[in-house]
Amino acid sequence: MDDFALLREFFQNRSQEAFRQLVDRHLAMVYSAACRMVRDPHLAEEVAQTVFSTLVQKGESLSPPQTVAGWLYNTARHIAMHAVRTEQRRREREQKALAMQSPEGEPDISQVAEHLETAMAQLEANDRDALVLRYLENLSLRKVGEELGISEDAARMRVNRALERLRVAFGEKGVAISCAVLATTLSSSLTSIVPAGLAATIASTALAGSAAATITQGATATMNLFNLKTTAAIVATAVTVGTGTYFVQEHQIERLAAENQRLTLRQEASKAGQLPAAAVSRASDDEIESLRKEASEVHRLRNELTQLRRERDEAAARETENQKLIQQLAHARDSALAHLRTDPRMMEAGIAAQRGACRANLRQIESAKEQWALENKKIVATPTAGIEAEINAYFRNSVQPVCPANGIYTYGPIGTAPTCSLAAAAGHTF
């Protein structure tokens, strides 16, 4: 089935198999185009997902002379351009924010220490669990999703939402801090060195019966105090070196930024049907002219393809007609031969013609014998048995004549006429 047949099958019968075939057929092209433009494999995956989501929304309106592949390519290009511009604007905002940062603009150590645990407590349990698993346990987003019983994309959305709510909680208490700094701070808390023997203490006290609860509470309080001091130290370092902490943790912040960008694309997937049109309105004149040339070239190629198909069909029709004529001629030939075989007059004429041809052959054999005898000075009655090959050299093209009725010739001695084995039966005489 061609692309439009698959589209019709999908929209009319909601055939998931038809849509999967479309995806399998064009995904490599769409993903490659997205990779070339966004230069980020993960972001290219999101672009490809958005392209095929747009096809689900708008594909029913596609019709020739458009092509599905061309439409998918243009849509991928527009969405990728939009993603690149969004990423550039995000980076520009981050650079401006970094340029404006100063030690005076960072939150006070005591403020962060005072409000961190309170702000974490204000989060809903699922948001707080997401932050703990992602940053404090240092799990990948896939593992976070498995722990929470959700998909990787849902885990990414939940972590980003929890970071934003934590930032808002700090803001309500008069502490201005960015999500990137919060993520870096939470991730950096993993560098804390656990006091020696603490794990053994916790394990033993957990098994100590009724006294375990008291000891465990003390150990938990010690851990909270230790984490609080660690956080304070990290913020103090950020205050001292300005934006240095950001660049030290740049790879973590870039990862978070990429995740935010992919989340943005997911959220915009629902309105992706309007995205290509918006992108076209912002395209440059060179891009528009390029699209026009591409459309003209596609139209020309489609016309050539139509002409070639027409010529192919005409050639196939001529071939079919020729086969019919050949069959008719073969039938007429067979009918004529059958008539000749059954007509007595024609049969008699054929026998007479064979008799005459055989007599002519016998005369040629006699003439060749005489020439051989003359040149080799042979007398009458000289036998010719065994020397037929020498006599055959005197025939035209050195080839012995053949009886038309499949008789066998005997040369005989010099001076004696040659004979045919059908002499008595068919009158093949000299």
Image (cartoon, helix red, strand yellow):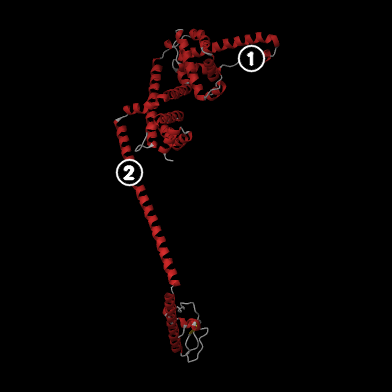
- Which SS class for mark 2? helix
Residue visible at 54% across and 11% down?
228
Label 1 Cα neighbours within 10 Å, binned few <14 / some 14-19 / many ≥20: few
Label 2 Cα neighbours within 10 Å, binned few <14 / some 14-19 / many ≥20: few
**Residue at the spot of label 1:** 198
Is residue 38 or residue 337 the one in the foreground? 337
The image position of residue 49, as x and y in percent, is 44, 29
Image quarter in which the N terminus is found: top left
**Residue at the spot of label 2:** 303
Would residue 188 be visible to someone looking at this image? Answer: no
What's under tag 1, amino acid-wise?
Leu
Is residue 104 or residue 153 the one in the foreground? 153
Image quarter in which the C terminus is found: bottom left
Earlier along the polypeptide chain: callout 2 or callout 1? 1
359 relative position to 222: left or right: left
What's under tag 2, amino acid-wise?
Asn
Residue 294 appears in which quarter of the rendering? top left
Residue reaching furthest right? 209
